Image (spheres, grey):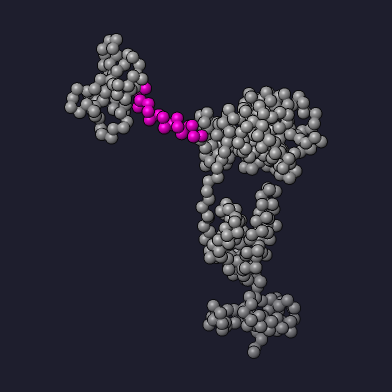
Amino acid sequence: MKMTTSKKKGSWYVDFVWTYTQGSKAGTSERVRKKSPVNTKVGAAEHERQLREQLLSGAPLDPRDDERKGHALFETHAKEWFRSYVVANNKRSTVAAKADILRKHLYPEFGRLSLNKIGSREIEAFKAKKLGEGLKPKTVNNATSVLRTCLSFAIDWGRLEHLPKFKRLKQQEPKRDFYTYEEGERLLAACDGQDRVLLATMMRSGLRRGEILALTWDDIDLVRKKIFVRGSAWKGFVDTPKSGHNREVTIPSSLLTILTAYRGLRYLRGGLVFTDAEGKMLTRDSIKHCLPRACRAAGLRVINLHGLRHSYASQLIIAGAPLKAVQELLGHSDIATTMKYAHLSPSVHADTVALLDRPPSLGLPVSENDNSAPPALKLVASSNDNAAMASPKVTDSANDNATTLPATVLPMSRKKVKAE
């Protein structure tokens, strides 16, 4: 076998043509030109021999070629993705959640698979397996979402050519229980001390649990009646709010009175609004029992702390607040999320349906027998044969002046009505 080595500009190179005899490239040829790691003629010849043996075994000449063909292991890629991207670009709580998903679900299932071996079939099998283990569809969807994001980066980094198809499992919309305004007042009347102030703040400002824990007196302006939401606490660390943006929340008068009185008792304890007996930040676990305790004392059904945020949104919507304003107060980046939080109570639906029992326009009665109309007004049917389709007249009994109403007074009619 002729060795094809040459020296150019002081460096020894290997330059030969290799013809593949097996695999997907069988029958094709490829030029191989590499710089010798040992810069001598003998070194170049040895390097060529090693290259030919490597090609004969079917191994790629460049390890990066192995990655580009999707042969890198999922666990190897995922760990690099986690270190270089997830840790640098996510909040601590999100980093912990993704680490948990990788450790519990993705590494055991896909860790030893090559990236190009993870297809729709393997993903569907994973979903079925997890559902069989008793996991909820939302939990499985969260896991496949992390998998999809991880594989997307494999494409960006040149390790994978195509992203497999992902189909989300259907999730049942969770029940979002909330308290009416009257129930909220009963709740606050049944508790006292810091618990009362904390629950009142959550229910009358819509702050999340982490935002409540991180709240400081510098974030509250009692003169301007504003709460400035600037941080969210997680395991003792304060990060940005969930949306990543600060926001302002107006303090209603009922909450302003409670906070003003509370500050007179607590401002010497430090910057945090809510603390333990030593003035340290409360934990998520330390506050989760205060609401069930107050619920039982008030004789109310028990809801979770996030239900107070639902209560805030729902009470605003029921009172007629615009959705856009509620979205800004809650700090939602997408108004579709606000729609989920601001669900209406059954009584609102009943009031809406009751509108069908009212006169269609101008508060007029539907028929002559309807006595709900003002005494000075009565409907007079048109005298022509098509009276039912004609525009009605309103006659003022004081001066007998008849006024023809527009056809829109009869919205239920689909036929075109001509005014007399």
Q: Image point 64% across, 30% down: which residue?
A: 298
Q: Horizontal and vertical percent for residue 330?
A: 59, 36
Q: For residue 78, what is the image quadrant?
A: bottom right
Count of picture labels: 0
The answer to whether residue 125 is above or below residue 18 is: above
Q: For residue 48, what is the image quadrant?
A: bottom right
Which quadrant, please, contains the N terminus? Answer: bottom right
Q: Horizontal and vertical percent for residue 310?
A: 58, 37
Residue 389 visible, this orientation:
yes
Q: Image point 32% across, 21% down: which residue?
A: 370
The answer to whether residue 227 is above or below residue 380 is: below
Left/right placement of residue 323 relative to residue 352 reads right
Which sits in the foreground, 358 or 144? Answer: 358
Left/right placement of residue 281 relative to residue 256 reads right
Among all residues in the image, which is located at the extreme right? 278
The answer to whether residue 300 is above or below residue 244 is: above
Q: For residue 247, what is the image quadrant?
A: top right
Q: Horizontal and vertical percent for residue 134?
A: 59, 56
Which sits in the foreground, 133 or 377? Answer: 133
Among all residues in the image, which is located at the extreme bottom? 1
Which quadrant, please, contains the C terminus? Answer: top left
Point out the stretch of residues depicted in magenta. Answer: 345-363
Residue 41 visible, this orientation:
no
Q: Image point 65% across, 76% down: which residue?
A: 61
Among all residues in the image, which is located at the extreme left? 385
Tell me the chief SS of the magenta region.
Answer: helix
Among all residues in the image, which is located at the extreme top? 398
Q: Horizontal and vertical percent for residue 158?
A: 60, 64
Q: Image point 52% across, 37% down: which residue?
A: 343
Q: Is residue 241 magenta?
A: no
The answer to whether residue 378 is above or below residue 82 is: above
